[in-house]
Image (cartoon, rainbow, N blue to C red):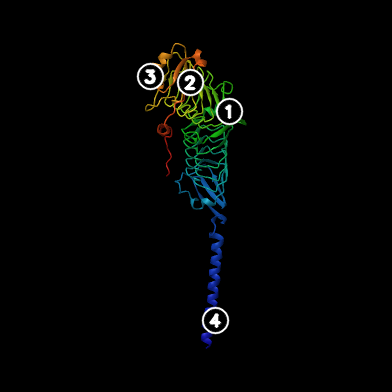
């Protein structure tokens, strides 16, 4: 009987211990596994030859010297907990932020980058949708492709004077204010690659501040001393409303003003000899004045300018028009080409220029502009517009994004 009571007592004790153990495990699971955002992480490790990382709470800190390592889209050592990180600190000594380092950190809302960083790698902060502001420090020279692409909630970006190169889609699909801390001359000399911000047709774009001043126009005063405007330099700049290029500017790069949807007036000075590929495509221009020195107008230079009605040309010799698969530089919405008196017939019979006669466009001498009246708009079928848009965007957006 005593032996039976002994076994019974032991069974009760063991049962109690088992229940207690299960209770502790359950409590542990609730506290530490129910919501990963509440976990207090503490970890460290290497992320480059001389770079290391530390995770404390919801903050990820990169320290050391030199470049961070490059990663694939899901290979960074902190990838499994990236949804818990809200703050990233890049400390002094780090010189390059690695490819895909913080890719899809969807809860990242605070970002601090030290001034020792010179390059921000490809896709480094892509799809960080909780970021609302980016401050790129003085010292950064290169922002690689898609570095901040699809960070759709960003409203303000500060860029340093030291910036010299911005690659494809670096700020793709972002609509925001850009505050540039250099001069207008500095901005015009930056190397931009294709669709570096916003969207292909300019429907998503930015307002540009040079220093504290919103840039609304380019004119001989603020362009004084500037001799060239790099390709894509004002791509999708929504704050621009007018452009008057002085004689001192000798080059405007391809796509320089693509997508400036609020740009209404363009006057090109005597220093320009060529309007390059897509230079003013998808802008809001309704009138254009071309100087007598322009001898070539490149493919789709004014494509998608649905408000363009009047083009004033000063050259007595028709500039060469270059087409792209049968698409000429001006849209068929142009109703009036104002040309030097006595050259109307020459323009009407010249290659490229003659294609606008059947659409209802008129070539009129400069002295009779006020007597021309209004010619009915030409309506282009939607199917043709879509086809031509796809053709242009295919050429402009030479995608180099590779998801590793």
Label 3: state its secondary structure.
loop
Q: CA distance from mark 3 to mark 2?
A: 17 Å
Tell me which numbered mark, 1 or 2, is placed earlier along the sequence.
1
Labels 1, 2: front one: 2
10 Å crowding of disc 3: few (<14), some (14-19), many (20+): some
10 Å crowding of disc 2: few (<14), some (14-19), many (20+): many
Tell me which numbered mark, 3 or 1, is placed earlier along the sequence.
1
Label 4: state its secondary structure.
helix
Disc 3 + disc 2, Cβ < 8 Å:
no
Identify the residue under disc 2. Answer: 311
Label 1: state its secondary structure.
loop
Tell me if residue 61 comes above or below residue 225 in the rendering.
below
Identify the residue under disc 3. Answer: 351
Labels 1, 4: front one: 1
Horizontal and vertical percent for residue 223?
A: 56, 23
Q: CA distance from mark 3 to mark 4?
A: 107 Å
Q: CA distance from mark 1 to mark 4?
A: 88 Å
Label 2: state its secondary structure.
strand
Tell me which numbered mark, 1 or 4, is placed earlier along the sequence.
4
Identify the residue under disc 4. Answer: 9
Q: Which mark is residue 281?
A: none
Identify the residue under disc 1. Answer: 216
Disc 1 + disc 2, Cβ < 8 Å:
no
């Amino acid at each position: 009987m005593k032996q039976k009571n002994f076994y019974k007592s032991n069974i009760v004790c063991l049962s109690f211990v088992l229940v207690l153990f299960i209770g502790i495990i359950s409590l542990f699971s609730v506290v530490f596994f129910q919501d990963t955002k509440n976990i207090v992480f503490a970890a460290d490790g290497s992320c480059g030859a001389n770079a290391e990382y530390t995770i404390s709470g919801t903050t990820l800190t990169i320290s050391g010297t030199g470049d961070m390592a490059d990663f694939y889209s899901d290979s960074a050592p902190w990838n499994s907990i990236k949804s818990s990180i809200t703050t990233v600190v890049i400390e002094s000594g780090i010189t390059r932020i690695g490819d895909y380092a913080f890719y899809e950190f969807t809860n990242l809302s605070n970002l601090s980058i030290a001034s020792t960083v010179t390059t921000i790698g490809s896709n480094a902060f892509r799809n960080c949708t909780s970021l609302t502001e980016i401050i790129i420090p003085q010292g950064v020279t290169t922002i690689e492709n898609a570095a901040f692409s699809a960070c759709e909630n960003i409203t303000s970006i500060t860029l340093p004077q030291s910036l010299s190169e911005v690659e494809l889609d670096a700020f793709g699909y972002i609509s925001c204010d850009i505050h540039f801390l250099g001069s207008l001359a500095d901005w015009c000399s930056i190397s931009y690659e294709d669709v570096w911000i916003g969207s292909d047709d300019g429907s998503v774009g930015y307002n540009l501040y040079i220093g504290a001043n919103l840039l609304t126009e380019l004119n001989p005063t603020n362009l004084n001393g500037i001799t060239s405007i790099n390709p894509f330099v004002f791509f999708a700049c929504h704050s621009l409303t007018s452009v008057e290029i002085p004689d001192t500017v000798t080059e405007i790069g391809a796509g320089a003003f693509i997508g400036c949807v609020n740009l209404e007036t363009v006057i090109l000075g005597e220093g320009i000899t060529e309007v390059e590929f897509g230079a003013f495509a998808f802008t809001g221009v309704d009138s254009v004045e071309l100087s007598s020195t322009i001898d070539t107008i490149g493919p789709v230079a004014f494509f998608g300018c649905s408000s363009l009605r009047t083009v004033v040309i000063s050259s007595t010799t028709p500039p060469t028009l270059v087409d792209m698969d049968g698409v000429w530089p001006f849209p068929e919405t142009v109703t009036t080409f104002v040309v030097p008196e006595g050259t109307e017939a020459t323009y009407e019979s010249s290659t490229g220029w003659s294609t606008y006669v059947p659409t209802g466009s008129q070539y009129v001498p400069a002295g009779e502009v006020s007597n021309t009246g209004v010619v009915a708009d030409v309506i282009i079928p939607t199917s043709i517009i879509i086809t031509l848009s796809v053709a242009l965007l295919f050429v402009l957006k030479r995608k180099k994004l590779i998801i590793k």
